[in-house]
Image (cartoon, coloured by chain):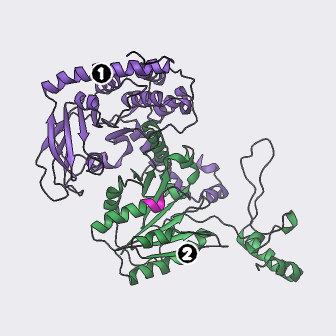
Chain colours: A green, B purple
Amino acid sequence: MKFVTVSGPPSSGKTAIILQAIDALKERRFQIGVVKFDCLVTDDDKLYQKRGVPVRKGLSGALCPDHYFVSNIEACMKWGLEKDLDILISESAGLCNRCSPHIKDVTAICVIDNLSGIGTPKKIGPMLKAADIVVITKGDIVSQAEREVFASRVRQVNPKAVIMHVNGITGQGAFELSTLLAQTEEINTLKGKSLRFSMPAALCSYCLGETRIGDEYQMGNVRKIDLSSKPTAEGPKPLTLKIFLIRLALMRLASPERWKSCLPG
Amino acid sequence: MFARLTDDHLDDMGLTLDQLRSALRDYVEGMGALQQEIDTVEKLTIRGGFNKDREAEDFELDLIPGQITCIVGPTGSGKSRLLADIEWVAQGDTPTGRHILINGQVPDAKWRFSIEHKLVAQLSQNMNFVMDLSVEEFIRMHAESRFVANVDEKITSILVQANELAGESFTADTPITSLSGGQSRALMIADTAILSRSPIVLIDEIENAGIDRKKALALLIKEEKIVLMATHDPILALMGQRRLVIKNGGVAKIIETGQAERDNLEQLEILDRKLMALRHRIRQGETLETI
C-alpha cells in the first residue's frame, strides 16, 4: 500500500485537492482510502463517502491534534491494509504551524493557497518546510504576478520540494498530482519510522486542565513573553521535563488538594 | 554564526545543527536556480493523441514565439486539458496521450517541476489583484522575486505599457486593488509580457472594455511570447494565425486564418471602433439619438 500525508492550513483546499486527485486515480483503477484528522468538527468525511471513498475520521477534541495524529496513525495504516487499499491518504490541518504530520520516508504534501498572503509561507513552518510536494491552490483568481511571487516565497522556505499548481474546483493539475502519487513507494508499516520534525513541547499545568490565570497556577514547561523594549538575543529557558516532573511530584505531596484541582474533569 | 546558536534556539525551530546546515545549502542552491536565465523556447511542438472516443487526433503543430493561436470550442470540450498537457509537457502520460516537444526535443524534467521553468503564464477574466500594494511596490516585488537587475527600468516600462493599453490612465502610486477591470487587465498583461519568465502566455478571453486588445496582443508578440488564446470573440479569433477547434476532448480541426478572413477582420474592426465610440459617448453622459 502507498501512504501519503496531506497537511495544510484550514480552508486551503486540502479536501478539494484530494477529491480531484482521487477522481484521477480512480480512472487509473487505484483503490483509495482517506483518514481525516481534525480538532472539533468535520463533515469532510461525508464528502468522501459521497464519492464512495472508504473514510475514517479522528477528532482530537481536548488533546493536542498532532500528538493525537501520531499516536493513531499506525492503527490507521492497519485499517488501510485490511481494506486492501492501494493508496491511503491522511488529511490533517497543520494546526499550530509548529507541528507537522510528515513522516520520514512517507511522501508528504502541503497544500497552501494563493489567497493566504505572501507572508504565509514563512509562517507555516515544518508542515511546508519538510514537505516533498507543495500544492498551491486558488491560482485561478489571483494575477500571474502574484502567483509567481507566491511560488517563489514557497521556494524560499522549501527549496527542494516539487511545487505544483492545482485547481480544486476545475481539477486543473490534479491529473499531474495523481501521477506523482501513483509513483510513491509501497510501505506496509509505520512502526519504527519517525516524524520529520519533533513536536512542540507543552506539559504544563494547563495541559492538566488548569484554567485559572496567574503565575501561581502555572507549572511546568512555561515560557514568559519578553515585553521589554530592547530585543533580547536569548529567550527565557523553558523548564526541562525532568524538573517539571519533579515539581509535579512535589506538588502532589505538598498539596493534594491543588493536585486534584489540576486534573481534568 | 552557527556557534552562537544555543540548543534552545534549535529546539524552538525543531532542528539539529546538521539539518540547519543542509537546509542552508538547499536554500542557497534554490535561490541560485531562481537567478539563472531560463532556456529559450524557439519552438513548441504539440503531437496529437486521441479524443474521448479514442479516435486519433492526427496532427503535429509547431508553435513559435510571436505567434497567436486561438483555441475554440464549447465549455467542457477539452480546452483546459490541452493547456494542462502543454503545462505538464505531456509525454503520452496524460488521458489524451499527447506529446509536447520543446525545440524539437523530448524536454528535460525541469520544465515540469521547477517554478523558474514554468512554461505557461495564465491571464484570465476572473483574476484579481489581492495584495495591498501600490502599482510600483507590486511590480518591484515581482521583479525582486525574480532577482531582476534593473528593477526601476522595468517598473517604468511596465507602467508606460500598461497605460498605453488601459483606456483610463493610472499612476505608480495607485493601489492595485483600486484599479478598474480594464486597468487591472492592462497591468497584468504588461507585467506578464515584460516580467514573467514563462515563454507561453495563455489568455482566457480579453473583455472588450477599458483595454486596447490589439495593442495588448502586439505587446506580448513583441516580447517574443507564444500566445494561446481561448476566445469566441470574432476580432480576437481572426487576429490569430490559426484556430484549434476542440471537440469531444480532442483537436478536431485546425483552421489557418485565410486572406478572406483577414479582409473581414478590417470590417469587424470598423464595427468595433464604432461601438467603442458609442460606449465613450455613454460614459460622457451623451445621448445616442443619432448614431
Per the image, label 2 sits on a secondary structure element best described as strand
Would you identify the image quadrant in which residue A198 lies?
Answer: bottom right
Would you identify the image quadrant in which residue A148 lies?
Answer: top left
Residue drawn at x 47%, y 18% is B287
Task: Write down the region rendered in magenta.
Answer: A10-16
Disc 2: which residue: A58
Disc 1: which residue: B271
Work out whether residue B205 or residue B68 is closer to the camera in this orientation and state it. B205
Chain of the residue under the numbered disc 2 shown in the image? A
Q: Residues within 10 Å of mark 1 (few under 14, many from 20)?
A: few
Q: Residues within 10 Å of mark 2 (few under 14, many from 20)?
A: many
Per the image, label 1 sits on a secondary structure element best described as helix
Residue drawn at x 40%, y 25% is B211
| Residue A11 shown in magenta | yes
Work out whether residue A37 or residue A128 is closer to the camera in this orientation and state it. A37
Would you identify the image quadrant in which residue B9 lies?
Answer: bottom right
Residue B232 % position (x, y): 28, 37
The amino acid marked with disc number 1 is: Leu
Q: Compared with residue A219, is residue A233 higher up or lower down, i.e. above or below?
A: above
Q: Quadrant of the N terminus of chain A?
A: bottom left
**Left or right placement of residue B218 versus residue A78 in this view:** left
The amino acid marked with disc number 2 is: Gly
Q: Compared with residue B209, is residue B113 higher up or lower down, i.e. above or below?
A: below
Residue A138 % position (x, y): 46, 49
Residue drawn at x 39%, y 74% is A52
Label annotation for residue B115: none
